[in-house]
Amino acid sequence: MIEEVPIDPASSIIREAVVKIGKMKHPLRLIETRDSEGNQIRIVCNDAKRSALEISDLYRKKWQIELFFKSVKQHLVLKKLYGKSQNAVFNQIYIAMIVFCLTLLIKHHIGYQGSLLEMLDWLKDYWCKQMKTFLAELSETSDRISSGRQKMGGHQRIYEESLAQYERGDAFHLDDVTYVPSTK
């Protein structure tokens, strides 16, 4: 341990210290706090800019953040980022959002009852064919027996809560383009 950092007794932080692990060259921060279930946890990080309370909150909310981004990747069909620059990532996300919205509009306009992902698959298959062919194929009844994969309600609820939290402005750290959730 290099030094103990003074903490606010009113905060949820139990301890904060600057430490070195093994023969590491650079010091790290050790933050002790409690998780959402009341268990004591230790967080070791190299982020010197954020407050200990903010890092603790990020850790507590990491599952919601991960589920939010997982849902964004799934709903926007964003499996891989092709560029590495900030501009390339934003452009790819914007394009995915536009495709998502256009697919949603088409689905709503033609009254398709299937899932949005099925609608997107139909569009991929019929994008170069005539609209009447596309609509005729789309309106045919399926001879499928299974109802398909069932939705997991808990993930959807967490996604909706996270989205509402973001819209209320309670997740300001998600707007920070320099935020890196992990340093792998």
Image (tube, grey):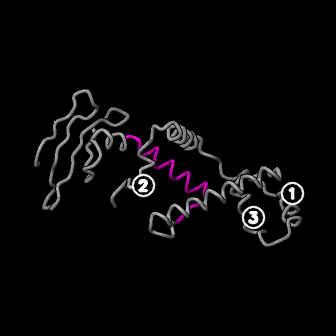
In the rendered image, residue 107, in percent from the top left (x then y), is placed at: 77, 53
Which residue is the site of mark 1?
139
In the rendered image, residue 20, in percent from the top left (x then y), is placed at: 15, 54
Question: Of helix, strand and loop, which mostly describes the magenta segment?
Answer: helix
In depth, the one of 119 and 92 nearer the eye is 92
Residue displayed at 44% across by 67% down: 85
Residue displayed at 28% across by 42% down: 51
Q: Name the image quarter holding residue 92.
A: bottom right
Q: Specify the amino acid type for callout 2.
A: Val
Q: Which mark is residue 177?
A: 2
Q: Is residue 10 above or below residue 62?
A: above
Q: Could you classify mark 2 by the number of other residues whose Cα lies within 10 Å: few (under 14), some (14-19), or many (20 or more)?
A: few
Q: Specify the amino acid type for callout 1.
A: Ser
In depth, the one of 59 and 177 nearer the eye is 177
Q: Which one is closest to the eye, mark 1 or mark 2?
A: 2
In the rendered image, residue 35, in percent from the top left (x then y), is placed at: 34, 37
In the rendered image, residue 61, in percent from the top left (x then y), is placed at: 41, 41
Q: Name the image quarter holding residue 131.
A: bottom right
Q: Specify the amino acid type for callout 3.
A: Leu
The number of discs equals 3
Residue displayed at 58% across by 59% down: 94
Q: Work out how far the residue at label 1 is from the one at label 2, CA to CA, in angstroms.
A: 43 Å
In depth, the one of 95 and 147 nearer the eye is 95
Q: Which residues are magenta?
A: 60-80
* Residue sitting farthest toward the bottom: 128
Q: Which one is closest to the eye, mark 2 or mark 3?
A: 2
Q: Could you classify mark 1 by the number of other residues whose Cα lies within 10 Å: few (under 14), some (14-19), or many (20 or more)?
A: few
Q: Is residue 123 above or below residue 147?
A: below
Q: Earlier in the sequence, mark 1 or mark 2?
A: 1
Which residue is the site of mark 3?
123
